[in-house]
Image (tube, rainbow, N blue to C red):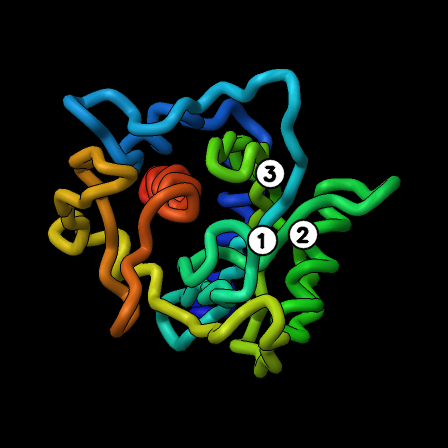
Amino acid sequence: MNYNQDNQIIIEKLQKRLKKNLPGEKSQLKMAPLINDIPYRKLVPDNNFYESAVLLLLCKNENTFDILFTLRSKKLASHRGQISFPGGRLEKSESHLEAAIRETYEETAIQPNNIVGSLSKLYVAPSKTIITPYVAFSEKKTDFTINEDEVEEAFFYPIDFFLNEENKLTEKWNLQNQIVDVPLWKIHKTTALWGATAMILSEFIDIWKEIN
């Protein structure tokens, strides 16, 4: 069996798996910031919340896959300067998937295709937002042009890094005058990958391990 056939089989297995019951919160909590083993922020929304969507884009890279990340602009109102997946809030009469595709294009000039499926929703308390993550696949690493009003940088990182448990670290951070245990991955020279994006990625990595 050649590599292209292997590659197609993996994507088909992922597509089938995403249609079944997902690990959800059990996986997300592996990367949740904690105080005394309790999530630092609540995971259930109040009555008032926003809806947003993000895209986890897998790109083939020789014998493995890379994942697309963005570094959010410091100009933004929420989650400024953090590593994230491309995405944002839904516009009027827009579906979650449409928002994920539009925002990815607006931020990186990548036109996503080959949508594989969706992951579990995640509530993010600081921005009062429920995020719906989608997974997409690209046969080749696509060039991007960043929108500097929304992102400072876009970059790919190999999925193999996240499969190695030794690369997952936990640091004690002072967040709003509270000492918080923050699980993270160091994938950028200045900024750690933590919080909501890490929690979403945690579920994806558990599913990826399951099918491989």
> For the residue labelled by badge 3, is the local secondary structure a helix, a strand or a loop?
strand
Q: Where residue 196 sits: x, y (%)?
A: 42, 42
Please report the residue visible at 56 percent of the width from the left and 43 percent of the height from the top. Answer: 133
Q: Which residue is mark 1?
A: 55
Q: What amino acid does circle 3 point to?
A: Thr
| Residue 132: numbered disc | 3
| Residue 100: numbered disc | 2
Q: Where residue 10 sits: x, y (%)?
A: 47, 52
Residue 68 in view? no
How dense is the environment of label 1, judged by Cα within 10 Å: few (below 14), some, or many (20 and up)?
many
Q: Are the residues at dot 1 and dot 2 in contact (C-beta closer than 8 Å)? A: yes
Q: CA distance from mark 1 to mark 3?
A: 9 Å
> For the residue labelled by badge 2, is the local secondary structure a helix, a strand or a loop?
helix
How dense is the environment of label 3, judged by Cα within 10 Å: few (below 14), some, or many (20 and up)?
many
Q: CA distance from mark 1 to mark 2?
A: 6 Å
Instruction: Pick the residue in front: 19 or 92.
Output: 92
Q: Are the residues at dot 2 and dot 3 in contact (C-beta closer than 8 Å)? A: yes
